[in-house]
Image (cartoon, rainbow, N blue to C red):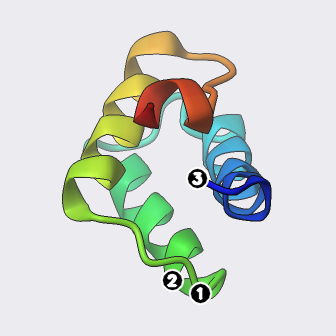
Amino acid sequence: MDSERIEALQAVVDRVTSYQDGAPEGTVEAELRSGFRDAGADVSDADVTRLAEAIEARHGAVSVEQVLS
């Protein structure tokens, strides 16, 4: 993945991570999809799910590069 794409995806992940605590089930994944769509980033369903699971499991900073590598 090129650095520009990683940076764009990381911005969305950071935004969603910042308010995910206490969010109803499915909210994190829905917000990731919405954020990626708004950013014009085409992210596969599998990658969105992997990122959502990482955010929900870690309750803290999630690295796009680490999760998707």
Instruction: State whether residue 53 is above or below residue 46.
Output: above
Is the residue marked by circle 3 packed among few (<14), some (14-19), or many (20+) residues within 10 Å? few
Amino acid at dot 2: Arg
Amino acid at dot 3: Met
* Secondary element type, mark 3: loop
Q: How many marks?
A: 3
- Asked if residue 26 can be seen in this view, the reply is no
* Secondary element type, mark 1: loop
Tell me the distance, in whole angstroms, between the alpha carbons under discs 1 and 2.
5 Å
Q: Are marks 1 and 2 in contact (CB under 8 Å)?
A: yes
Q: Are marks 3 and 2 in contact (CB under 8 Å)?
A: no
Q: Front-most of 25 and 38?
A: 38
Residue drawn at point x = 54 percent, y = 24 percent: 66
Tell me the distance, in whole angstroms, between the alpha carbons under discs 3 and 2.
18 Å
Tell me the distance, in whole angstroms, between the alpha carbons under discs 1 and 3.
15 Å
Residue 53, which numbered label?
A: none
Task: Tell whether 36 sits left or right of 52.
Answer: right
Q: Front-most of 1 and 47?
A: 1
How far from the left and from the top, in percent, is residue 36? 54, 72
Amino acid at dot 1: Gly
> Which residue is labeled 2 in the image?
37
First reached walking from the N terminus: tag 1 or tag 3: 3
Residue farthest to the left, as pictured:
46
Instruction: State whether residue 27 is above or below residue 59.
Output: below
Residue farthest to the top, as pictured:
58
Instruction: State whether residue 56 is above or below residue 27.
Output: above
> Which residue is labeled 1 in the image?
40
Residue drawn at point x = 43 percent, y = 37 percent: 68
Q: Are marks 1 and 3 in contact (CB under 8 Å)?
A: no
Residue 1, which numbered label?
A: 3
How far from the left and from the top, in percent, is residue 63? 63, 28
